[in-house]
Image (cartoon, rainbow, N blue to C red):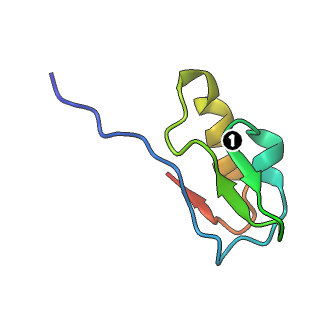
């Protein structure tokens, strides 16, 4: 059996424009700081939050969030 690579979310705050789409899609995984920049709350979301986190990654208008 092959070990699966750990699934992890990263965000580049220098690219983020503060649209908030990530927080709307996955509030358990993302937040925004006082300037509106993305904050990753859970870099490795559990199975219950994984689909929402992937939706948030795809919803980012500037692709500041990656897996």
Q: Is residue 54 above or below residue 13?
A: above
| Quadrant where the N terminus is found in the figure | top left
Q: Residue furthest left?
A: 1
Question: Residue at 61% of width from left, 21% of height from top?
Answer: 48
- The image quadrant of residue 50 is top right
Question: Residue at 63% of width from left, 31% of height from top?
Answer: 51
Question: Residue at 54% of width from left, 23% of height from top?
Answer: 47
Q: Could you classify mark 1 by the number of other residues whose Cα lies within 10 Å: few (under 14), some (14-19), or many (20 or more)?
A: some
- Secondary structure of the residue carrying numbered label 1: helix
Q: Position of residue 7 (x, y in %)?
A: 42, 40
Q: Residue furthest front?
A: 34
Residue identifier under label 1: 55
Q: Is residue 43 left or right of residue 28?
A: left
- The image quadrant of residue 61 is bottom right
Q: Position of residue 24 (x, y in %)?
A: 84, 44
Q: Is residue 48 above or below residue 35?
A: above
Q: Is residue 47 left or right of residue 27?
A: left
Q: Is residue 14 left or right of residue 35?
A: left
Question: Residue at 55% of width from left, 34% of height from top?
Answer: 45
Q: Position of residue 57 (x, y in %)?
A: 64, 50
**Relative depth, front residue between 34 and 54:** 34
Tally of numbered discs: 1
Q: Residue furthest bottom?
A: 14
Q: Position of residue 52 (x, y in %)?
A: 68, 34
Q: Is residue 66 left or right of residue 1?
A: right
């Amino acid at each position: 059996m092959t070990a699966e690579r750990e699934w992890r979310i990263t965000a580049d705050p220098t690219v983020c424009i503060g649209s908030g789409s990530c927080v709307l899609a996955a509030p358990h995984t993302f937040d925004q700081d006082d300037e509106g920049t993305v904050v990753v709350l859970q870099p490795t979301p559990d199975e219950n939050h994984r689909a929402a986190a992937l939706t948030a990654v795809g919803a980012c208008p500037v692709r500041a969030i990656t897996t």
